[in-house]
Amino acid sequence: MNWVINGIKSSMKLEKYSMSFTTGGIFHQESIQITALYLDFMDWSAVRDYVHTENVLQTRTISTAKKRYREINTRLQQLNLKELETLAESSAHDQKYLLWLAICRRYPFIGDFSIEVIRERYITLKSDLHYEDYDFFFSKKAESHPELEKIKRSSQNKLRQVLFKMLREADLLLDNNLINAAMLTPQLINLISASNSNDLLFFPVFDSELAG
């Protein structure tokens, strides 16, 4: 299987990074709830109204509910209908991988980090991942993405903390900072490939395991 890695890198270099992923983690259970509602309503506006009216996310304030729903919604909208249907019906393991896929699509910065740092370290048998790896990547990307230079140090630390939290919740990073290989099923590989085979590069896995 041929990967167009250079094509991904060159295209993403021109895109301004969105760095608004400081809200929570992967929102596993909440995302499954909202996905089920969407598959019932097939209308994101109706889902939003229902979530807020019924306080589906069980937040204490309306502002928190809106912020959390908005974040989950923008991620889920990165998945096509077949992917959403699979998300609603699959195992918790596969659900986490699909949510990670949605996060990487939503945030190209995270997608690039997954490909250029996490997966690269994994396939070159460097099994650990630390804050220093993130900091080096951030500094490197700031050279071609001036929007990163405007982020305060405290915000940078928050972004780093949340990203590592999401990696652990997605079962891609262990508590001892070892990269946890993605155990993608053939069904999941085919599902993701049907949309964009390059998206499989978001996961720490060897090419031979993706060839099927």
Image: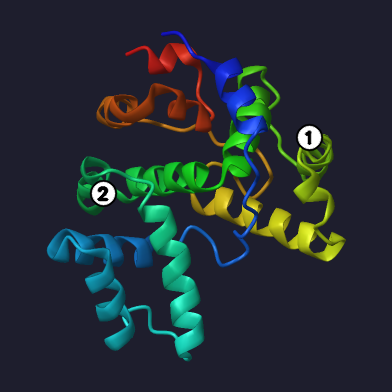
Q: Residue at x 81, y 41 (%)?
A: 142
Residue carrying label 1: 144
Q: Callout 2: helix, strand or loop? A: helix
In front of the other: 52 or 57: 52
Q: Is residue 142 above or below residue 60?
A: above
Query: Residue 171: which disc?
Result: none
Q: Residue at x 63, y 64 (%)?
A: 22
Residues under labels 1 and 2: Cα distance?
Answer: 34 Å
Q: Is residue 179 visible?
A: no
Quadrant for residue 161, please give it.
bottom right
Query: Residue 84: which disc?
Result: 2
Q: Callout 1: helix, strand or loop? A: loop
In the displayed structure, does residue 179 sit left or right of residue 61?
Answer: right
In front of the other: 1 or 38: 38
In the displayed structure, does residue 32 sit left or right of residue 140?
Answer: left
Check the picture and name the quadrant holding the C terminus: top left
Q: Residue at x 67, y 31 (%)?
A: 13
Q: Residue at x 83, y 65 (%)?
A: 154
Check the picture and name the quadrant holding the N terminus: top left
The reply to whether callout 1 and callout 2 are in contact (CB within 8 Å) is no
Q: Is residue 29 above or below residue 176?
A: below
Among all residues in the image, which is located at the extreme top? 2
In the displayed structure, does residue 163 sit left or right of residue 51?
Answer: right
Of the two numbered discs 1 and 2 in the rendering, the one whose residue sits closer to the viewer: 1
- What's the residue type where badge 1 is placed? Ser
The type of colouring in the image is: rainbow
- What's the residue type where badge 2 is placed? Leu
Q: What percent of the width, then of the height, locates residue 175?
A: 64, 50
